[in-house]
Image (cartoon, rainbow, N blue to C red):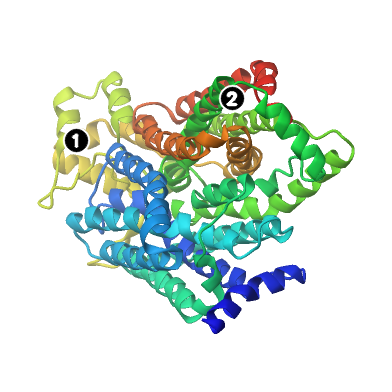
Amino acid sequence: MASTTAANETPYLHAAEGKHPKGLYVLFATEMWERFSFYSMLALFTLYLRDPTEGFGWTATQATTLYANYLMFVYASPLIGGLIADKITGYRKAVIIGGFFFMAGHGLLSIPALWAVYAALTCLVIGNGFFKPNVSTMVGNLYPEGSHLKDRAYNIFYMGINVGALFSPIVMEIVRQYAGFHAAFAVAAFGMVISVAILWMFKNDVESTERSPLRSAEQAADTAATAVDAPPHGISQQNESEQTTANNLRQDRMNAVPDWKRVAALIVIFLIVIVFWMVFHQNGSTLTYWADDNTAWNVSGTISNAINPLWIIILTFPLVWFWGLLDRRGLEPATPTKMAIGMMLTGLSFFVLYFAATIGEGTVATPEQLAGGSFRINERVLGNLRADGVPEDALQRIATAKNEENKFVINDVKFFAKEDETTGQKISGEQQFIDTINGVAPGQGTQYRDAFLQRSYLFQVSPFWLLLAYGILSLGELMLSPMGLSLVSKVAPLRMRGLLMGGWFVATAIGNKLTQIGVYWSIWNQSKFFIVLGAMALVMSVVLFLLLRPLKKAMPGV
């Protein structure tokens, strides 16, 4: 008993000395490798489902729908996993259980079968529910209540999330190119093995985290935020420099506001959050498709998933410094104002992509570009070909033709230059494309060659547009995401705080389900898709700006 007590007190001794306990770095590494495996899967998933060779030859609509359903369950799962850990398993044991489910999920994805995909997604949702909320809780439990190191600890931990998210798409791109999708999924599983091994080997350094948490509002917010990979409240810097007396006065003002007004204000925030996640999490589906098809670089769309975490790492600490500078001068905006600006930036990021798409859609491909380009037929292209006079029976054969493995032959399949496996000669995407159409609709490919090539040609624009859009989107995330959870923790009536924290997770899950709007990617022009999403985000930004005055009255001092 004495040795256990001493072990439990050790982190607090470090905290009292102004040093972070070793347990923080254990949890940093545990989370970094877990996020490496998690984001490895997300970077590959939709492209894997669409791949006609190693995957299942799904259309973008089918892949996007499954992706949206998976995200919905993943981002709702911490509600249940956190409750089980609180009441039954404890935190470290829950994280270990989650780790084994993660290993199983990523391992199953390395099996080339559709049943394995669904079994894998089930394991990954369960694993996330056990792992994510409880490793975040363990971070806060390393520190005594009131420790000034706790905010910094969550910021460091959040960097671990983004380091794992940054390197996973890069590694996956390399492994996929040389060994294929299934080997890449196996590497993701190995990352999870490292994560669990670190937590197990250094378990003595995190023993103190098993105590029942008496969480402050800020720790509750940070735990919930990092459980869904959102920034902790310290990144917002809101009111960080205020004295305890001032904080108490602010809370007294808050308590004077009727509960119904505070709850109504939070519901408005939840609606904003739904739209934000719907737009933001296009990164694993439509933005990956854009990166794969319409961005001029010599890599697949997998690599684009590294851009957001890179921007987060670059922007986080300058933004914290900037808010601190404004705070010292009494100019820091209120939390709802920051959220409105964040939503506006989210919308603007998609307007950048809209502008890039209009450039691409407005170009006419030259014979040289067609000879070296790539091609894809989808619902949008079929409609355009119909208008060009291509016979309906030919279009139907193209849209419905499947091979013996029940994979689409032409519909939503990408044709690009590659070597013939038999002769070793390089065959252009153009030639493969026309030959395949002729095989399904004899003679039609040759007769309507120009229409097929121009309508199906995948234009490409500079990677600059995607990098710029992600930079603006990431800044919007940093301004909006930590604000929302910090707001819930401060504004929610004490007796309803747990319920309204749960409301945040539900809003996040709904927003992720609505990423299914990506099914229109194959129906609308890319420019239309981007401007619709950008306009939705900007409308919510305007609504929030218009509601600033009543929101500030309902949430004084934040």
Q: Residues within 10 Å of mark 1 (few under 14, many from 20)?
A: many
Depth check, mark 1 against mark 2: the one in front is 2
Q: Earlier in the sequence, mark 1 or mark 2?
A: 2
- Amino acid bearing label 1: Ile
Identify the mark at residue 398; answer none if there is no mark.
1
Q: Position of residue 505 (x, y in %)?
A: 45, 40
Which quadrant would residue 354 be assigned to in this image?
top right
Identify the mark at residue 478; answer none if there is no mark.
none
Q: Residue furthest bottom?
A: 3
Q: Residue at x 62, y 48 (%)?
A: 216
Which quadrant would residue 388 be assigned to in this image?
top left
Residue 260, compared with residue 152, is above or below; it is above
In this picture, residue 494 sits left or right of residue 274: right
Residue 83, compared with residue 376, is above or below; it is below
Q: Position of residue 66 (x, y in %)?
A: 29, 43
Q: Are dots 1 and 2 in contact, CB under 8 Å? A: no
Q: Residue at x 56, y 32 (%)?
A: 350
Q: Residue furthest front?
A: 1
Which quadrant would residue 529 be assigned to in this image?
top left
Question: Quick one: SS at disc 1?
Answer: helix
Q: Residue at x 18, y 23 (%)?
A: 391
Residue 427 appears in the rendering:
no
User: Mark 2 sits on what residue?
Assistant: 262
Question: Quick one: SS at disc 2?
Answer: helix
Closer to us: 193 or 214? 214
